[in-house]
Amino acid sequence: QVQLVESGGGLAQAGGSLRLSCAATGRTFSSYAMGWFRQAPGKEREFVAAINWSGGSTYYADFGKGRFTISRDNAKNTVSLQMNSLKPEDTAVYYCAARTGPAGSRFEKEFRYWGQGTQVTISS
């Protein structure tokens, strides 16, 4: 089992950057693929980015390509999401999630463990 705690959310201006971090407990962090999802007010939760167990493979939603970068540090049990060129439509609660198994995924139902979320608000 793994517990996830996100941090790094907050308020930023359009065009700015934020870096989200997710700290995981447990000794088997490297056996999990990790992902970031987000949920905007009145909308369903959607995929943002994912990374496989080693960090060698990454996956992005189209809206994040070229702007967002997911990375992980298995020695520190952390996964991060660097978000650049932020837009007001990036405003959402961002969730970190862990998937049992090494391969990344875009599908929410394949992620078993979830953090509590961190609010990101982008002003225009």
Image: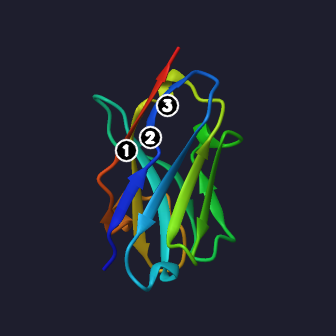
51 above or below 10?
below
Q: Which of label 2 and label 3 is nearer to you?
A: 2
Mark 3 = which residue? 90
Name the amino acid type tagged 2.
Gly
Name the amino acid type tagged 3.
Asp
**Residue 107 at what x, y percent from top left?**
43, 59
Query: Residue at point 56% right, 25% down?
Result: 87
The answer to which of marks 2 and 3 sits earlier in the sequence is 2
Q: Which of label 1 and label 3 is nearer to you?
A: 1
Mark 1 = which residue? 118
- Badge 1 marks a residue whose secondary structure is strand
Do the CB atoms of the residues marked 1 and 2 lie less than 8 Å apart?
yes
11 above or below 65?
above
Name the amino acid type tagged 1.
Thr
Q: Residue 87 carries which label?
A: none
Looking at the image, the residue that sits furthest to the bottom is 27
Mark 2 = which residue? 9
